[in-house]
């Protein structure tokens, strides 16, 4: 890339296609929230100051004798401009090209793929994406950004300018002070923001909670003392006493740390004293961020040490299954001048992380218990992520299991807890039954449910990708083991049928059927590990079952689709001895010219079972031929 950085000339560069699209969309869809540009720019300036303070921990020269970090705002009514200036980290020419003019966010392409063209829906999405610096163009028809990276000399300033259409210009300029200055040339109809009083009130709303002072500069003031007015409180919100913070302040701070423009669903603010003193302010968002499923997603929780920003890395501060949590952790006793790498490995950091995870679980418990509607939203947006926790966080496995919500054969909404399930178990039932399938529809229609349904036994239906991982890690709940209805043997004999349940059909004895089962097995050859009589079927003639230690079909297909090597395991074919088709097979086996025709029918039986299991036939053409042979033969 470096050869594209042209140090001395003024050059015109084109925006990345996505930026153009974003600009267009933003200008149109965020028009009713236009004041957010101030929040975004002040947020960026505050982050830039945080970054400088952190880098200066190891290189104090970066302060250039100017260590009072602040943001200054001024207006010029005649020129119709608003100017924001910070003395934070600044940007080099290369950084300007990378950060302003391209969208480096991971998941960008996926995000743009989701846009619908419907302005209302897209406005929602764009809020999740975080519009950042580009929001300037909602109110400005030209933006000039001048910046110098801390540590570079004065002649390495960079000026970036754009009208927010197709391109921008870039030139190298002298800049005496490090940091970033942004001049917004306001559109004619955005004069309201040029009004000092209006501007200050918006700034206050968006910046009261950030730790860096925001000063309003009025050079024309008569009185010297009115020339500089600090607009915000400039103390970090989380350091204040809880009862001194209003709901609105908590929400405003969330929008800053969460890069979200919707209110959060809930938060927890704790000061912990003990072996490690720390303060945590952690939020549960009301919706999933656009990059929830992106491996390189930006972090959600920031670490501060004694109010100095240290790092932003959700994966280290929060486990992956809580990656949707936003907020700050401020540790009092960690060394300030340690590298991020070392910090991540200290036991102290582990303790803080563990404590914060417990606080988040407490918060979720509280929502699940006392604010059910809100918990339903948490589940809707983050349920699939929380499920990962059962395998990821052994220490909190039981607590996470209680937070899970399921759909079952009797409740068609994802609201059933494992405790609900256990409370409803039939007399004589000692297992929690579940079924995994590729889709909910496939799960509901699965033959494996037939006998259980007849007995009135509830079965948990699982159709998320993560569910196989979930049941691979959750073996029991409340002393009851979890059992797949598509695996191993099911023994329903001990479960009492309730009144009104279907009476059980008299199935022919398995021993009597042994020759038939042997015969089918011989006909199927390699395709089936075994053929046995089923006690889980009622309407269907046959189904596939995975042997106790084997992978089930759904999991095997899932792993394969993820490119993993999967040990080949052959399924067991279970047949319903009461079914007319099986009876017909039996009759066929007694006929004198049995051979080929029996084999055909047995093959078809197997094909059906494979299809019902959600699998694919190795020989679809053969299947069609066999069916047609039967239809027209
Ligand atoms: P976001 O803040 O969500 O990353 P932005 O578009 O607002 O997105 O900013 C993109 C990047 O530009 C920031 O991550 C930061 O690296 C850089 N940047 C923006 N404003 C400033 C500033 N005032 N000082 C230094 N860097 C900045």
Image: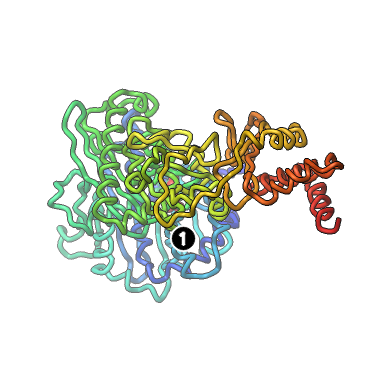
Taking depth in this image into account, of 27 and 282 the one nearest to the observer is: 282
Q: Which quarter of the figure has residue 373?
A: bottom left
Q: Quadrant of the C terminus?
A: bottom right
Q: Where is 266 relative to 355, above or below?
A: below
Q: Where is 20 relative to 443, above or below?
A: below
- Determine which residue is flagged by label 1: 126
Point out residue 507 in the picture as x, y percentages from the top left corner. 58, 44
Q: Where is 239 relative to 60, above or below?
A: below
Residue at 35%, 65% in the rendered image:
35
Point out residue 77 in the picture as x, y percentages from the top left corner. 33, 70
- Secondary structure under tag 1 reads helix
Point out residue 472 in the picture as x, y percentages from the top left corner. 48, 34
Label 1 CB less than 8 angstroms from ligand 1: no
Q: Quadrant of the N terminus?
A: top right
Residue at 28%, 44% in the rendered image:
69
Taking depth in this image into account, of 573 and 484 the one nearest to the observer is: 573
Point out residue 539 in the picture as x, y percentages from the top left corner. 60, 53
Q: Which quarter of the figure has residue 320?
A: top left
Taking depth in this image into account, of 526 and 246 the one nearest to the observer is: 526
């Amino acid at each position: 890339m470096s050869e594209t950085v042209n140090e001395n000339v003024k050059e015109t560069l084109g925006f990345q296609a996505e930026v153009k699209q974003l600009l267009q969309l933003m200008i149109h869809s965020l028009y009713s929230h236009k004041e957010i540009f101030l929040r975004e720019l002040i947020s960026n300036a505050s982050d830039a100051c945080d970054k400088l303070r952190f880098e200066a921990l190891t290189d104090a020269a970066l302060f250039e004798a100017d260590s009072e970090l602040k943001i200054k705002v001024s207006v010029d009514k005649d020129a119709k401009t608003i100017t924001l200036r910070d003395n934070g980290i600044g940007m080099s020419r290369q950084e300007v090209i990378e950060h302003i003019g391209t969208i480096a966010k991971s998941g960008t392409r996926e995000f743009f793929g989701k846009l619908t063209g419907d302005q209302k829906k897209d406005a929602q999405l764009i809020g999740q994406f975080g519009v950042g610096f580009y929001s300037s163009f909602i109110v400005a028809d030209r933006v000039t950004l001048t910046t110098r990276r801390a540590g570079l000399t004065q002649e390495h300033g960079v000026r970036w300018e754009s009208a927010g259409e197709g391109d921008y210009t870039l030139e190298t300029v002298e800049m005496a002070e490090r940091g970033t200055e942004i001049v917004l040339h306001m559109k004619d109809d955005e004069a309201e923001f040029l009004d000092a009083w209006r501007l200050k009130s918006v700034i206050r709303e968006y910046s009261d909670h950030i730790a860096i002072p925001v000063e309003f500069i009025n050079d024309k003031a008569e009185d010297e003392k009115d020339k500089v007015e600090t607009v915000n409180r400039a103390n970090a919100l989380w350091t204040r006493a809880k009862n001194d913070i209003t709901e609105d302040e908590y929400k405003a701070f969330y929008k800053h740390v969460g890069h979200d423009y919707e209110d959060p669903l809930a938060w927890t603010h704790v000061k912990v004293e003990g072996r490690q003193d720390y303060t945590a302010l952690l939020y549960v968002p009301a919706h999933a961020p656009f990059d929830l499923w992106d491996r390189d997603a930006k972090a959600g929780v920031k670490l501060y040490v004694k109010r100095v920003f240290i790092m932003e890395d959700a994966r280290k501060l929060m486990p992956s299954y809580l990656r949707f949590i936003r907020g700050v952790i401020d540790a009092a006793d960690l060394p300030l001048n340690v590298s991020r790498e070392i910090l991540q490995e200290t036991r102290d950091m582990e303790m803080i992380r563990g404590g914060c995870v417990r606080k988040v679980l407490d918060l979720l418990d509280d929502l699940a218990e006392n604010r059910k509607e809100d918990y339903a939203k948490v589940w809707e947006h983050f349920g699939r992520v929380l499920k990962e926790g059962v395998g990821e966080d052994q220490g909190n496995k039981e607590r996470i299991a209680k937070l899970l919500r399921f759909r079952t054969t009797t409740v068609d909404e994802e609201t059933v807890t494992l405790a609900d399930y256990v409370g409803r178990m039939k007399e004589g039932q000692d297992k929690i039954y579940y079924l995994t399938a590729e889709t909910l529809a496939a799960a509901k229609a699965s033959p494996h449910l037939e006998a259980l349904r007849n007995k009135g036994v509830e079965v948990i239906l699982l159709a998320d990708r993560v569910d196989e991982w979930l049941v691979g890690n959750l073996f029991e709940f409340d002393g009851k083991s979890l059992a797949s209805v598509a695996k191993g043997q099911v023994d329903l004999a001990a479960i009492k049928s309730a009144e009104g349940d279907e009476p059980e059909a008299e199935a022919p004895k398995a021993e009597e059927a042994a020759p038939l089962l042997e015969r089918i097995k011989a006909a199927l050859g390699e395709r089936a590990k075994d053929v046995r009589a089923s006690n889980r079927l009622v309407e269907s003639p046959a189904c596939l079952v995975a042997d106790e230690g084997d992978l089930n079909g759904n999991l095997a297909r899932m792993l394969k689709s993820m490119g993993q090597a999967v040990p080949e395991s052959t399924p067991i074919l279970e047949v319903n001895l009461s079914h007319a088709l099986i009876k017909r097979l039996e009759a066929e086996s007694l006929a004198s010219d049995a051979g080929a025709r029996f084999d055909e029918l047995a093959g078809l039986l197997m094909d059906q079972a494979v299809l019902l299991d959600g699998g694919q036939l190795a020989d679809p053409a053969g299947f069609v031929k066999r069916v047609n042979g039967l239809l027209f033969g």
